[in-house]
Image (cartoon, rainbow, N blue to C red):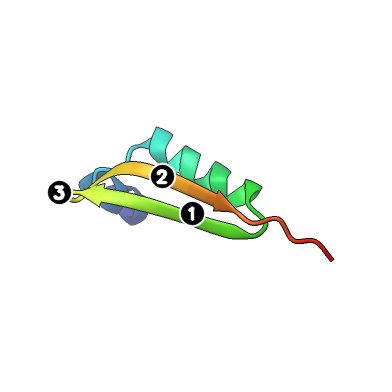
Amino acid sequence: MSAFNDIIIENGVGAEQLKVIVEALSKVRFGIIQLTVHDGKLMQLDITERRRFA
């Protein structure tokens, strides 16, 4: 797991940002999670959620 942590730190993703990403993944059932990166750093997270009706 240490190598994974090194990659995250080197690529400009902090623990708080990673927490937000994981939280978004756990909440969205159908949709899109889009990450915006500038100069190798995570700048923005957009969530588009789809509602399905049977």
- Which amino acid does the dot numbered 1 rest on? Ile
Q: Earlier in the sequence, mark 2 or mark 3?
A: 3
Left-right relation of 37 to 21: left
Task: Residue at 64%, 60% (x, y): give it.
Answer: 30
Q: CA distance from mark 1 to mark 3?
A: 20 Å
Other residues around mark 1 within 10 Å, as few (<14) / some (14–19) / many (≥20): some
Q: Are the residues at dot 1 and dot 3 in contact (C-beta closer than 8 Å)?
A: no
Q: CA distance from mark 2 to mark 1?
A: 7 Å
Task: Residue at 55%, 45% (x, y): give it.
Answer: 24
Other residues around mark 2 within 10 Å, as few (<14) / some (14–19) / many (≥20): some
Q: Position of residue 38 (x, y in %)?
A: 20, 48
For this rendering, which residue is in front, 1 or 41? 41
Farthest residue to the bottom: give it: 54
Where disc 1 sits, the SS reads: strand
For this rendering, which residue is in front, 41 or 47? 47
- Can you identify the residue that label 3 sits on? 39
Where disc 2 sits, the SS reads: strand
- Which amino acid does the dot numbered 3 rest on? Asp
Other residues around mark 3 within 10 Å, as few (<14) / some (14–19) / many (≥20): few
Q: CA distance from mark 2 to mark 3?
A: 15 Å
| Residue 50 visible within the image | yes
Q: Earlier in the sequence, mark 1 or mark 3?
A: 1
- Can you identify the residue that label 2 sits on? 45
Q: Position of residue 6 (x, y in %)?
A: 27, 49
Where disc 3 sits, the SS reads: loop
Q: Which quadrant does the C terminus fall into?
A: bottom right
Q: Quadrant of residue 4?
A: bottom left
- Which amino acid does the dot numbered 2 rest on? Leu
Q: Position of residue 25 (x, y in %)?
A: 57, 51
